[in-house]
Amino acid sequence: MNVPAEKIAEVLGGRHVLGRSVHSMRELDVIVREGMPKSALDKFIAFLTASNQNRGTETVQLRNKIVSRATYQRVDRLNVQVGETTERLARLYALALSVFEDRNAAKRFLMNPHPELDGRAPFDVALTEIGGREVEEVIERGLHGLPA
């Protein structure tokens, strides 16, 4: 199941944050290659922490899993590697959102340990490209009711 680039861009803050409208994966790739604004990372993490009482602490913890604190404070735009990780996580959130049709359910899926991922949270697994593919497979199997 492919997620439309527009949905991924929306999770990253849309035109307001990205500086342009996104209608294709190619356009999203250009943003990543040119240096995604770090505010796109902030917007994505805000989706994940919206209803939490410890939002500030969780925001910093999640962000530090993606980019080091020193780098985050030093730059306005993310390098390609961090931009790719941010896009991948936003894509998986958008995919989970399209499957569950509920922001809280999509967030719970990403942030909680999952038995098909050896008890690791999909967010943590998806910090690598290979892990991201593994998380996509879990979502696909769940969508189609297939066993692990």
Image (cartoon, rainbow, N blue to C red):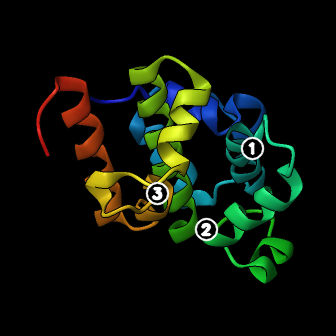
Left or right for 44, reference 107: right
Q: Which residue is mark 1?
A: 49
Residue 67 place in picture, x, y as percent: 66, 72
Instruction: Nearest to the eye among marks 1 and 2: give it.
Output: 1
Q: Nearer the viewer, residue 146 or 45?
A: 146
**Amino acid under disc 2:** Ile
Residue 22 visible in image: no
Instruction: Name the outermost residue toward the top.
Output: 101
Q: Is residue 134 left or right of residue 144?
A: right
- Which quarter of the rendering shows the N terminus? top left
Residue tagged 3: 121
| Position of residue 57 measured from the top left corner of the image (x, y, whole percent) | 84, 61
N-term mark: 3 or 2: 2
- Does residue 121 sit above or below 80 in this rendering? above
How far apart marks 1 and 3 lie (CA) works out to 15 Å
Residue furthest out toward the bottom: 70
Q: What residue did someone put label 2 on?
A: 66
